[in-house]
Amino acid sequence: MNINSANNVSFQGRCSLSNYKACLKGGAIGDAMGWPIEFHHLDSIKSRFGKDGIQDLVINSRGQAEITDDTQMTMFTADGLIKAARKSLNLEKMPDMNTVFDSYKLWLKTQFSDIQQKGKGWIAEIKDLYARRAPGNTCISAISGNNPGSIEKAINNSAGCGGVMRVAPAGLMYKDNPELAFRVGAECAALTHSHPRGYLPAGVLSEMIAHIINGKDVNQAVNETLKTLQKYDNHEPVTALMKKAQQLAKSDINPSDAIKELGEGWVGDEAIAISTYCALKEPKDFAKAVKMAVNHNGDSDSTGAILGNILGAHLGIEEIPSKWLKKIELTDELGQLAKDLYVKPQDIEDVAKRYPIN
């Protein structure tokens, strides 16, 4: 399979496989760095790790930095979107969200059983995904209820960040149509999170990544995405917080204080705003940005993961410290998943076995 063949030029546009890999692996690094300090106050983090907070990945007994449900669900989002794209072979229209929801049900089984699911695709057969890493209650209850929500059909009132932290693949797959990427990301989140502050930030992340993959810098991506965001009902709180993130990034306010003004990241719009602020503040330095994104009071793994997605897409794999790339859990699998998102679904090697559809 030649992923640089002429047949794929229009699909790939100006993107690079390096940026696809960095988007997913960068997200996993941010997730893994934030995982040991999630739920901790900044004073407690500094007491444990020093005055600058956590500065490196924490390695487990297997020599790996553990990912959480954020990266797990990101992988299953990709699984669902690729399967849905296989059904339609049309990336210019909305994918079947029931197919994505089915992939989330596969993820749910990994949280309650260590028996690998056969015949459901290669993602569901990855042994190390069968690990419970603080999954969100909203995701568990919504998926186990087997009643997927949508932007038009609310199933709860959750505004948590569990919707936005998992949708980076939507921006990668639908990068040729950033407005559609927004809708796809928002609908992926709305499957489980029905409050606009829960699903609109997912649209923001997805469209931002699409613009970045197409060559825009982070601030340009924010500006373009805000135009789409403002077309949606009840966008005002999300829009206001994104604009505040831009303003704070231009100021001389200490980053810790700036992040406090944006929130703690438990709510979807706070998580995307904190991550965007850090990406705007350190657009050329992945290491500095990811440390900034996790060292705060709140949902450190989610803000780290989202920052990693954004800045990874922007900088490419070469700008991420190699020592981190080697240590993150499932680094090879994330690299393979990036390759699968990079090509047309029908061009994925052994696609029928690896992404089976009914």
Image (spheres, grey):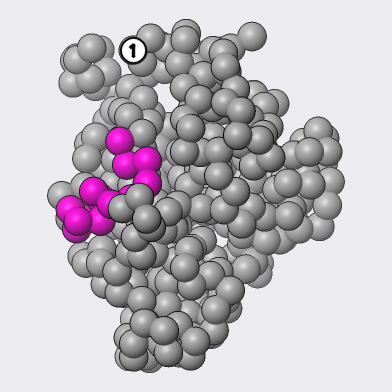
25 relative to 222, above or below: above
In the rendered image, residue 330 lying in the magenta stretch gets the answer yes
Q: At which x and y percent is residue 236?
A: 66, 67
Q: At which x and y percent is residue 160?
A: 67, 61
Q: Quadrant of residue 117?
A: top right
For residue 124, side relative to residue 212 (left or right): right
Secondary structure category for the residue under label 1: loop
Number of residues whose C-alpha sits closer than 10 Å to that of mark 1, classed few (under 14), some (14–19) or many (20 or more):
few
For residue 194, side relative to residue 199 (left or right): right
For residue 10, side relative to residue 27 (left or right): left
Q: Quadrant of the C terminus?
A: top right
Front-lying residue, 242 or 134: 134
Q: Quadrant of the N terminus?
A: top left
Residue visible at 78% across and 38% down in the picture: 144
Residue visible at 47% across and 10% down in the picture: 353
Front-lying residue, 134 or 307: 134
Residue extending farthest to the front is: 61
Front-lying residue, 25 or 309: 25
In the rendered image, residue 161 lying in the magenta stretch gets the answer no
Visible in this render: residue 128? yes
Residue visible at 74% across and 53% down in the picture: 138
- Residue under label 1, please give it: 349
The magenta span reads 320-332
Q: At which x and y percent is residue 343?
A: 33, 22
Going by the numbered disc 1, the residue's amino acid type is Glu
Visible in this render: residue 312? no
Q: At which x and y percent is residue 82?
A: 49, 23
For residue 258, side relative to residue 131 (left or right): left
Front-lying residue, 51 or 1: 51
73 relative to 194, above or below: above
From the image, give the main secondary structure of the stretch colored magenta: helix
